[in-house]
Image (tube, helix red, strand yellow):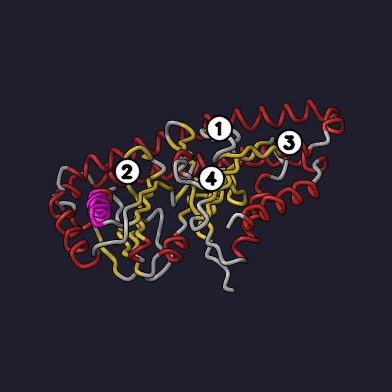
């Protein structure tokens, strides 16, 4: 039996207003078979627990969506198994998840039971200090990201004066007529494909290639791709296709950044000088030339300044996130030696067996 595919997304973003959550979009609770909400503090093995279950199920041929932590790329915050209609999720802060249908759909998994509490008592002050340091650094992260958003909005506002939205949407209609036929049934979910992380800006273009064999790269440095992508999303929905709408971390409330349509094996990814696409696409669409050259010339210095300043702000946000991660790593290192990981893995195996037995 062939292994299942593993795709990677984010459901939480380091955004201008703070931590922005899409965890309500993890899975449709009204139709889900089971959701395991994992509770427990730092270093108790939540990510390892989910990886162990995912590894076994993927080896059994089930596809998995790995939901990564934008504050720590090596950590999992959730896993979805679409064919099983089952999900695992870290239910602790900042993305607190509580059951809507306890025991019927969601099941609480308490990994804090595997702490050796008596051994941790002597580390009380060190734990408090590390947790405080981690928490206090995040407001600085969000201020830098908010400043970057303000500067990119200024670029967008300047360029928009000379852009014909109709021209962009006309190009979208041409793609729609060629690519989007009638589909098997409508579904819609929100994700982030990109994130601002301690390692820098990251975009999981590999996930687009896993789910879609035909990739349109939309090269856009001015924030115009949303106008094309929103038309494509509407057409895909009207024609009955599963749509994965991926939003921009700098404007998570409103701005589409990438769109994947797995039932057509068709993906649309936005690339830029900041997020360059790392492969050869099926087709590349340049939106920058659709901006009026006279407007660009008139605003050249303003655009150059805003691009440079926004990049500097994002670099500072990344540096601050790296400080947060160091503090969190120290916190986990205080807990790790006092966790019964054999118990964690045994519980993971028990839940894996129950999932397989239910099929």
- Quadrant hosting residue 69: top right
- In the picture shown, does residue 161 fall above or below 127? below
Look at discs 1 and 4 and give the one toward the viewer.
1
- What residue sits 72% from the left and 27% below the top? 129
Look at discs 3 and 1 and give the one toward the viewer.
1
x and y, in percent, of residue 91 in the image? 59, 37
- What residue sits 52% from the left and 48% below the top? 33
Looking at marks 4 and 2 on the same chain, the residue that comes earlier in the sequence is marked by 4
- Quadrant hosting residue 328: top right
Numbered range of the magenta stretch: 227-239
Q: Mark 2 points at which residue?
A: 255
Looking at marks 3 and 1 on the same chain, the residue that comes earlier in the sequence is marked by 1
In terms of secondary structure, what is the magenta stretch mainly? Answer: helix
196 and 7: which is toward the camera: 7
| Tag 4 and tag 2, C-beta contact below 8 Å | no
Q: Name the residue under label 4.
A: 70
Q: Does the magenta stretch include residue 95?
A: no
Q: Which mark is residue 112?
A: 3
Looking at marks 1 and 2 on the same chain, the residue that comes earlier in the sequence is marked by 1
Looking at marks 1 and 4 on the same chain, the residue that comes earlier in the sequence is marked by 4
Looking at marks 3 and 4 on the same chain, the residue that comes earlier in the sequence is marked by 4
x and y, in percent, of residue 27 in the image? 47, 45
Q: Distance between the residues labelled 3 and 1?
A: 16 Å
Label 4 environment density (alpha carbons within 10 Å; few <14, some 14–19, many ≥20) = many
């Amino acid at each position: 039996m062939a292994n299942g595919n593993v795709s990677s997304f984010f459901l939480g973003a380091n955004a201008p207003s703070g931590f922005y959550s899409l965890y309500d979009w993890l899975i449709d609770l009204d139709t889900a078979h089971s959701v395991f909400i994992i509770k427990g503090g730092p270093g108790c093995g939540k990510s390892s627990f989910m990886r162990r279950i995912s590894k076994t199920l993927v080896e059994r041929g089930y596809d998995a969506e790995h939901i990564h932590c934008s504050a720590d790329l090596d950590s999992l915050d959730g896993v979805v198994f679409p064919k099983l209609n089952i999900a695992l999720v870290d239910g602790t802060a900042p993305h607190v998840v509580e059951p809507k249908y306890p025991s019927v759909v969601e099941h609480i998994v308490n990994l804090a039971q595997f702490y050796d509490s008596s051994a941790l008592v002597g580390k009380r002050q060190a734990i408090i200090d590390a947790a405080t340091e981690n928490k206090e650094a995040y407001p600085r992260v969000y201020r830098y990201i908010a400043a970057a958003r303000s500067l990119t909005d200024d670029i967008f506002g300047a360029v928009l004066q000379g852009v014909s939205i109709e021209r962009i949407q006309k190009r979208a209609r041409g793609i729609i007529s060629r690519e989007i036929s009638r589909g098997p049934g409508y579904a819609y979910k929100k994700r982030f494909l990109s994130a601002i992380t301690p390692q820098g800006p990251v975009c999981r273009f590999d996930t687009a290639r896993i789910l879609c064999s035909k990739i349109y790269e939309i090269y856009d440095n001015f924030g115009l791709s949303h106008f094309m992508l929103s038309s494509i999303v509407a057409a895909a929905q009207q024609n009955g296709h599963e749509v994965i709408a991926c939003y921009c971390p700098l404007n998570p409330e409103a701005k589409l950044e990438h769109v994947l349509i797995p039932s057509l094996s068709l993906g649309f990814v936005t690339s830029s000088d900041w997020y360059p696409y790392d492969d050869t696409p099926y087709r590349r669409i340049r939106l920058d030339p659709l901006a009026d050259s006279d407007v660009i010339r008139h605003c050249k210095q303003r655009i150059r300044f805003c691009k440079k300043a926004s990049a500097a702000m994002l670099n500072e946000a990344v540096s601050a996130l790296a400080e947060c991660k160091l503090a969190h790593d120290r916190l986990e290192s205080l807990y790790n030696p006092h966790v019964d990981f054999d118990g964690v893995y045994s519980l993971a195996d028990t839940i894996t067996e129950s999932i397989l037995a239910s099929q």
